[in-house]
Every structure is written in structure tokens, then in C-alpha cells.
Amino acid sequence: MTKISETGKASGKHPKPLASQKLVAFVATLDLDRAKHFYCDTLGLELISEDNFAVAVNAAGTMLRITKVHALAPENYTVLGWQVADITQTADLLQNAGVQLQRYPGMQQDERGIWNAPSGARVAWFKDPDGNTLSITQF
């Protein structure tokens, strides 16, 4: 396995063309206006740009492009997640903004819907208006 230095450069013979490049994340929507309202107004992400194809927002330095699609079948797994410093406070803020945290049968979730993973991480899930599963995690 090639080791990555603190500068993000690979030590070894193989070039790593994307190791130091910024990531752009994508999520699909059927309705750009509804998605813009949710991601900007409800979640508080800063609008970068918008056109007929996508709404781009700033997610703490990562560009998230919310892309208009004609058909969408949301997955049953998390497609976007945020690492948070205080999951209890973040969960309360989300719920106060009208976001419902998801509950899953067989999982030991607290009264807010936060699950304590065996690793010690605490995780909660919620859906965007298109049914995409999003999460918050405190490590």
C-alpha cells in the first residue's frame, strides 16, 4: 500500500493525480427550487451558483452540486454526510428547522434518533425532499 504524506503526496512510484485536488460532491433532485430551499434555507449551506441544470452550494469548502434529474430512485444508504462537533446540538437544530430524524427498526437510537455505533461514533440520519438519505456523525 502506498503511504500518503502530510502534504497529500504519495510516497512511491505511482502518480496520484487526484490526491491534492478538491472534491466536488453531487446529489440528485427532481425539483431544483425545492432542493435549493432545503439545502440553503433549512440546512444553511451558502449558495454559490444556480442554473437550469444544478444548484451549487458551499459545504464547508466542498462544492455540493444538486443536480436536476428527470427520474430519481433514492438509495437506502447514506449519500451525503456531515461530521459534526456536537451531534445532540446539531440534531436539535435540524429538528427545530423542521427536519425529521429517521428511525430504523432494530437499531438502538435515543429519543432524538441518534445511534451509538460500536466504534464510539454517534450517527443520525435524515432525508432531503427527494428522499436521499443524509447523515450527521460525531466521531
Image (tube, rainbow, N blue to C red):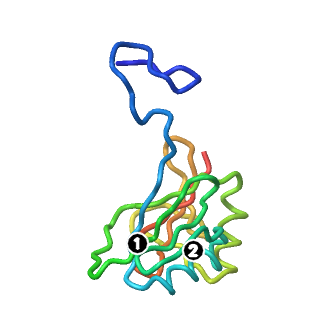
Q: How far from the left and from the top, in percent, is residue 77?
A: 36, 62
Residue 8 horizontal side relative to residue 96, left or right: left
Q: Nearer the viewer, residue 51 or 8?
A: 51
Say what secondary structure mark 1 lies in.
strand
Q: How far from the left and from the top, in percent, is residue 21?
A: 49, 39
Q: How far from the left and from the top, in percent, is residue 75?
A: 31, 68
Q: Quadrant of residue 44?
A: bottom right
Q: Nearer the viewer, residue 23 or 44?
A: 23
Q: Quadrant of residue 106?
A: bottom left
Tell me the residue that label 1 is attached to: 67
Q: Quadrant of residue 13?
A: top left
Tell me the residue that label 2 is attached to: 39
Q: Which amino acid, by three-letter code, is at mark 1?
A: Thr
- Assess disc 1: are there few (<14), some (14-19) or many (≥20) residues with their C-alpha within 10 Å of its C-alpha: many
Q: Quadrant of the C terminus?
A: top right
Q: Quadrant of the N terminus?
A: top left
Task: Tell me which residue sits at (41%, 61%) in the image.
Answer: 78
Q: Which amino acid, by three-letter code, is at mark 2?
A: Tyr
Farthest-out residue, front = 51
Q: Nearer the viewer, mark 1 or mark 2?
A: 1
- Distance Cα–Cα, label 1 vs label 2: 12 Å
- Assess disc 2: are there few (<14), some (14-19) or many (≥20) residues with their C-alpha within 10 Å of its C-alpha: many
Q: Nearer the viewer, residue 1 or 68?
A: 68
Say what secondary structure mark 2 lies in.
helix
Q: Is residue 97 above or below residue 7?
A: below
Task: Tell me which residue sits at (57%, 43%) in the image.
Answer: 120
Task: Tell me which residue sits at (52%, 27%) in the image.
Answer: 8
